[in-house]
Amino acid sequence: MKSISSLKNLKGKTVLLRADFNVPFSGNKVLDPFRITAVLPTLKYLKKLGANIIIVSHAGDDGEQSLAPVAKLLAKSIPVTFVASFRDIPRIVSTGSPRVFLCENIRREAGEKKNDMKLAKELASLADLYVNDAFPVSHRAHASIAGVPKYLSAYAGLQMEKEVKHLSQAITKPKKPFIFLLGGAKFETKMPLIKKFISRADYVFVGGALANDFLKADGFEVGTSLVEGGYNLKPLLANKRLLLPLDVVVTDGKKTRSCSVESVEKNEMIVDIGPESAKLLSQAIAKAHTVLWNGPFGMYKQANGKAGTETVLKALAKNKKCFSVIGGGDIVAVVSSMKLEKKFSFVSTGGGATLEFLAKGTLPGIKALK
């Protein structure tokens, strides 16, 4: 990828910057600004070079969420003008000195998700060059991701560079002992990772809803827990590198308790890994030199489903010699709530994009920059 760090002078130039401001909202309040603050170094760098900056982004899948609250939050760090449509930009840019504009949710444009070339060309006509700093959405071949680079010189932003560098390092040059931690749900997207890393890592620990399928396939009762089914897990269960919880936290809707995986009742739901599993995993992590982690180990939004993830995160944060990469929207939310972002080597802004990059080593948005 060509990087913006190779650019020296952009005075009088206009940059179309694709950012990812798909953050959690409560009404018009931004709940977690992690992805917003991640793009600030790129914004400030481009501004320092003298460029006009037109930011294109989205929030939500359907385009209903306005980005106006994001503009308000951004304005605390860098002067920004919010515009209701990118089509207003040519008139505004020509009226003054270099400025920063944030356009309304690009998914309000029908052609965005269809990678419509007419929309891509219209967006490209606004600028002299294109910068992609939206790693979390770069697994989508959308107009503002894969279409615009067909018409403009395209560069990777600073956050995009970091994502590719650190995730690639975890894939290709992991220092041993290497432990891969995988939680959450969505077996379809995570099964390829288990199969890939079971031969590369010293251990692959599976927690969260993913572990329920493995436990059931191994003959254990999982009660009313979420199980996806439809996968032949016996070959993986026979692999000594695969680690599963030895104990779990369960609830019947009234009472919550910890128990061994052999003791789960039919009316109980598994909501977290148990304290013994968290302790043993923490001890292993204390000796690890590389840890790659995607997804929480329990229902972290519930009081009884977050202890396991938090215990292991604290243990990882204490291992100063470990190259630690955390990825996936849900686990990043836990890291943010614990204010541990600076305790790890790298915290990825991506969710599905992180999973796809780990599995394939590239993304449509990255390919478009070459």
Image (cartoon, rainbow, N blue to C red):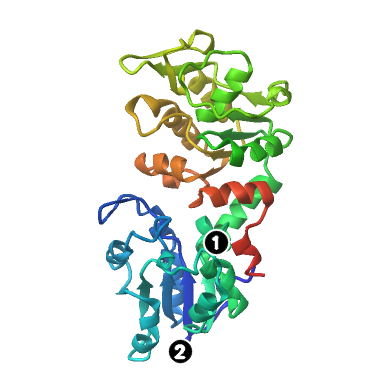
Mark 1: secondary structure: helix
- What residue is pinned by disc 2? 12
Q: Is residue 143 above or below residue 317?
A: below
Would you name the residue on which mark 1 appears?
160
**Residue 345 versus residue 190 in the image, above or below:** below
Position of residue 234 relative to residue 32, above or below, is above
Residue 295, position as x, y percentages in the image:
50, 38
Residue under the point 40% across and 87% down: 90
Amino acid at dot 2: Gly
Residue at 51% over, 51% down: 350
Question: Closer to the N terminus: mark 1 or mark 2?
Answer: 2
Residue 64 in sight from this viewpoint: yes
| Residue 163 position (above or below residue 143) | above
Crowding at label 1, few (<14), some or many (≥20) Cα neighbours within 10 Å? many
The residue at the far top in this view is 263
Residue at 40% over, 55% down: 60
Q: Which residue is more in the foreground, 213 or 54?
A: 213
The reply to whether residue 286 is visible in this rendering is no
Q: CA distance from mark 1 to mark 2?
A: 25 Å
Callout 2: helix, strand or loop? Answer: loop
Residue 40: image location, x then y, percent? 41, 65
Amino acid type, callout 1: Met
x and y percentages locating residue 135 in the rendered image:
53, 58
Q: Quadrant of the N terminus?
A: bottom right
Comparing 30 with 227, the one in front is: 227
